[in-house]
Each structure stands twice: as C-alpha cells, then as structure tokens.
Amino acid sequence: MDMRQLRYFLAIANEGQITRAAKQLNMEQPPLSRQLKMMEQELGVVLFDRNGKQLQLTQAGELLRQRAVALMNQFDETITYVQELGEGVQGVLSIGAVVSCISLLPPTIRRFSEKYPQVTFKIQEGDHYLLGELLENRDIELIVSRLPFQSDFQSQHYSVLPLPSDPFVAVLPSEWCLDKDQKTMTLQELVQFPFLTLKTDRTTGMHNQIFQELKQHGLEPRILSECSSVAITVSLVANGLGVAILPKSVMTSFASPNIKQVAISNAEFQSEVGIVWLKDRHLSKSARHLMAIIGE
C-alpha cells in the first residue's frame, strides 16, 4: 500500500460513498472501486460495511483511518520541511486567536511583515474548543490564547510557549467617575456596580479567575451579563450598563471617551497568555519566526 492509496481510502472514508469520493479525487468510479478492493485484499480485512450506496467504516477501517490521517499529516509536513530548506520564509501562515487575545496580533503581524513580506496570514478567531479542533485538523499551526488552554484534548497533547503576563484592569463608564483623574479603584468599589463578564458556555477560565479573586476578598458582585464577545462587553460598558474586569491588552483596541480604564489597587492578579501548538507537528519556518517575534 502506498501514499496514493491512502489518499484514496481517506477520500472514501470522508465522503462515505465511492461516487462522491471519485468526484473529489477527479477520477472515474470503477478505478477507485478497484483500488479499494485491492487494499482490502492486501490487508486481508474488510474496511467498509456496505449499506446500499453508503459506506461505513468497520473497526479495522476506523483504525486505518486514524493511522492514515497521522501518516498523511507527517508526510505533508515532511515535504514542507524539505522544501523550506531551500526557500526563504514565504507562503500562508494560518493561526488562531481567542477573542481576548486578538489585540496582541496587530503589532506582532506588523513587525513580522516588515521582516518577511512574502508571508500572508489566515487568521481564525474562536474559543478554546473551536481553535483546538482547528489545530487538531491541521487547519491552523498556532493559537494565541489565554492559559490554561481548555479543549476536548488532553493538555499533554500541546506544547505551550508562555508570554508575558497581562494585568487585569477595571473598565467602567466614564460618567460614573466623579474624579476624572482617578487612576485606581478597589474591588470593594467595583462590586457596587453591575458586573459584565467575558464567558462562553465552555471556556470559563478567565471568568473563574476573576470571581475567585473577588471571593477571596469576600465579595460577590451582581452579574448583569455573561458574554462571549469582547466587543459587545465593552459596548455595554460604554453605554453605562456595568463594569468589567478585563486583561489590559484587550483595551488597546477599544479606545473611547465613554470608557475609563483604571488599575485595581488591592488585587494584582494577572492573566496568563501563551502560544499553543501540537506537540507532534513540525512547525513551518513562518510559524517559528512568528513565535520568536511575539515572544520578544
């Protein structure tokens, strides 16, 4: 069995039908059917159960699919690695970022593009679980994320490069500040107002960290809104609906005369940030150079 046959097998497994797989592979159906029959004869196992026109993987077929995906990924990454030995840094770099880390990307991409103008970016935004799936499927190489990184896979599955910690700040409507020169507030002062918190159904790390800090001070704020969007949360603050505690870097993208950002004087807690990638994946030159720049 060769790599070409593995590609045929994976196309059939993904499509669940010979006809659709042949169309995807830009070949006729009879030759593809013969290739599948040859693979089953060579292996001495049945790879698919036939249910009319639909094909379902057998236990042996599912095992082969898992191993074939891993082999094809290693093969493609090896080709990329060999090609890069004789080339400069170029091509498309696919990365992901959680919503609260998007503000870290523009200065990094600007410095990177000044050094490596032949590289273009494909950027995906999402929560840990969506980005973890994209990383697992090799759709992206790196994720810029709040730590710890939560996904459907075990933490041992990832490598993590920690970045400088990001202090939390209080964000509140400007009209609520009687002292326009005020630079700090205490947690006790903040809990007098309704709270707006950044949280999704599955990614709760930052929310939990903030509310654990409040709990240690014996405080329990009234939550007005739980929201997965940084932009919506900041918009609610700007419209006088509540206060939020956010990483300081987030606010670089949301300057507004209706918002005031102040330090929290009696809590010096930090948001941990890092770059996440698959341990078993060869990273492209572009990805390695981006990691070097963002870690400067």
Image (cartoon, rainbow, N blue to C red):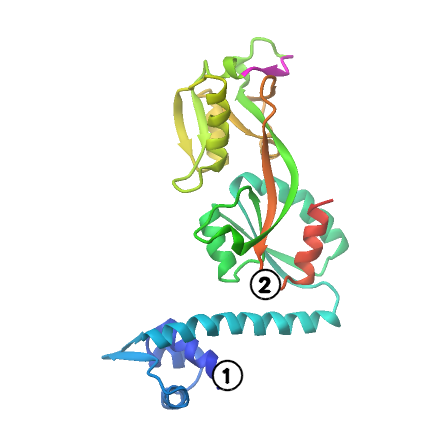
Magenta span of residues? 181-186
Q: Which mark is residue 281?
A: 2
Estimate the x, y position of residue 82 in percent, counting from the top left: 69, 73
Foreground disc of the pair 1, 2: 2
Name the foreground residue: 117 vs 96. Answer: 96
Labels 1 and 2: the sequence-earlier one: 1
Circle 1: element type:
helix
Q: The residue under label 2 is which amino acid type?
A: Arg
Do callouts 1 and 2 mark residues in contact (Cβ within 8 Å)?
no
In the depicted structure, whether residue 208 falls above or below residue 112: above
Examine the structure image and report whether residue 177 is included in the region drawn in magenta: no
In the depicted structure, whether residue 166 falls above or below residue 222: below
Q: The residue under label 1 is which amino acid type?
A: Arg
Name the residue located 32 percent from the left edge and 75 percent from the top edge: 58
Q: Tell me if I can see residue 76 in this picture.
A: yes
Estimate the x, y position of residue 167 in percent, counting from the top left: 62, 29
In the depicted structure, whether residue 263 falls above or below residue 105: above
Marks 1/2: CA–CA distance: 22 Å
Label 1: which residue? 4
Name the residue located 49 percent from the left edge and 59 percent from the top edge: 136
Circle 2: element type:
loop
Estimate the x, y position of residue 213 in percent, counting from the top left: 51, 24
Name the residue located 52 percent from the left edge and 56 percent from the top edge: 157
Q: Tell me if I can see residue 238 in this picture.
A: no
The C terminus - image quarter: top right
